[in-house]
Each structure stands twice: as C-alpha cells, then as structure tokens.
Amino acid sequence: MKELQKAIGYTYKNISYLENALTHSSYANEVRNGVKSNERLEFLGDSVLSIVVSDYIYRNCPKLPEGDLSKLRAALVCEKSLCRFSTELGVGNYLRLSKGERNLRGHERPSILADAFEAIIASIYLDGGMAEARKFILRFVEPEIKNQKPKAFKDYKTTLQEIIQKNPEEHLEYVLVGEEGPDHDKHFSVEVHLNNNVIGKGGGRSKKEAEQQAAREALKLMGY
C-alpha cells in the first residue's frame, strides 16, 4: 500500500479510506463480515471531480462558451479518461476483488478502474480535504488540457440537455429500469423521460454508458 500512496502522491492519516476505495462490491459481497464496497466513495468522488474540473476549466478557458466547457469536462471525466488515469497509477494491482472477478481480469476492466479512481478522489478528500483532492485531480487534468489531449467525446447527454434547456418548462430525467447479471458482468437498462414520456432507451455495462446510449437514441428520434 505504501507504493500506491507514493504513486498517488499523498500519505493517508487514516489508511482505511484508501482500503475502502479499493474494495469492489464483488469482494465485499464475498467476504461480508462488515466489509463495505467503494460505491459510496465513488458517488462522492464523482461530485468532487466534477466541481474541481469545472472550476479549473472555467478559470483557465475563458474563451470557451458554456456548451464547449461542458463538452471539455465530459471528455476529461469520461470512463475512458478515468480508466487511463487509474492505469497510470497501477490501481488494478491493488484492487480488492472476489476470486471470480479476479479470474475474469476485473482488475483490467475500464468501468472498475474508472470507479476506483473516483473512489480514490473521495478517499483523499475525506482524509485530507479539498485542497489535497484538487491537487491530485489537477495532476492528471492539467496536462490533458495544456497538451490538448482530450479526445472528441460524443456526450449525448449534454447535447440533449442543451436542446431541452431551450424550453425551460420541459423536464428531463434518466430512470434506471433494469439491472441484470453478476457483479463481474452487469448490464444496466435506462430510459430517458421528457415530461414523463419515454423518448429514448439505452443499455450498457455501467449506468453512465446506459444513460449516454438512451440520450443517443433520443437525439436520433428527434432528428439530430
């Protein structure tokens, strides 16, 4: 664990935060005995990541309009980018997975690595505060922006939201309608509702992917 802390660039006062961040739900379900998965940390880390990246690009990309800021943020925090950041740290070597998940090479799965990266952000935030979390995040984000590395990312959710926002009275909502399969091979089904009417459906190996696919279908049906 010392090697991972060195790679992260942060020394924990309470190492249990990092241990929790590395605990996949498959391991928690297999071991039980009060062991908690990193899902709650992932939830918090996603929010911390979003505010740090939003604040940074707002301050450092003054010429970009709101729509382009949203697209840039989406490219920086998408699963592909977070997986790459996680891989750079060697997080897969430290993940706590069930035997079955490990045998299926879960430590290399993009969704698991991306989720773990968000959980690590939360663990740093809880242990050392926002300043340390920001320092950790920007270590990865700054080079991406300065070197103009962010790849074009089809952010269907943002595109759909921009269209719907033109009519303030409209209400857009993503609803999880299905979750199937074992922990190592989940499939999520999502519907996107406009004023309670289903305008798109999508599926994927993560909720985020399913939402993107639902938004993509909605845009297609709307003629975009």
Image: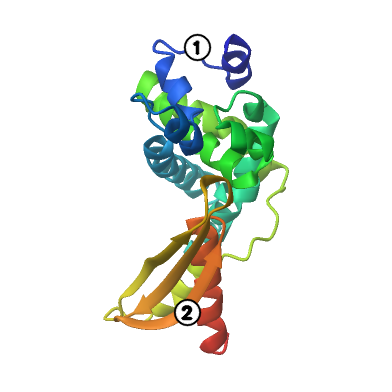
Q: Nearer the viewer, residue 176 or 218?
A: 176
Q: Is residue 219 above or below residue 133?
A: below
Please give left or right for residue 26 compared with residue 195 in the image. Answer: right
Q: Quadrant of residue 216?
A: bottom right
Q: Is residue 210 above or below residue 171?
A: above
Return the disc, 2 or 1, that comes first in the chain's sequence: 1
Q: Is residue 14 above or below residue 146?
A: above
Quick one: label 1, few (<14), some, or many (20+) residues within 10 Å? some
Q: Position of residue 50 (x, y in %)?
A: 45, 46
Considering every residue shown, the one lying at the far left of the view is 169
Q: Which residue is mark 2?
A: 200
Q: Is residue 119 above or below residue 214?
A: above
Name the residue located 62 percent from the left edge and 66 percent from the top edge: 154
In the rendered view of the protein, which quadrant contains the N terminus? top right
Q: Position of residue 122 (x, y in %)?
A: 42, 31
Instruction: Answer whether residue 111 is visible to the viewer in this image.
Output: yes
Gap between marks 2 and 1 measured at Cα: 45 Å
Q: Which mark is residue 63?
A: none
**Type of residue at label 2?**
Gly
In the rendered view of the protein, which quadrant contains the C terminus? bottom right
Label 2 sits on a secondary structure element that is strand
**Type of residue at label 1?**
Thr
Instruction: Answer whether residue 67 is visible to the viewer in this image.
Output: no
Q: Nearer the viewer, residue 96 or 144?
A: 96
Q: Position of residue 203 (x, y in %)?
A: 54, 67
Name the residue located 50 percent from the left edge and 42 percent from the top edge: 56
Q: Which residue is mark 1?
A: 11
Label 1 sits on a secondary structure element that is loop
Name the residue located 60 percent from the left edge and 30 percent from the top edge: 139
Q: Position of residue 121 (x, y in %)?
A: 47, 31
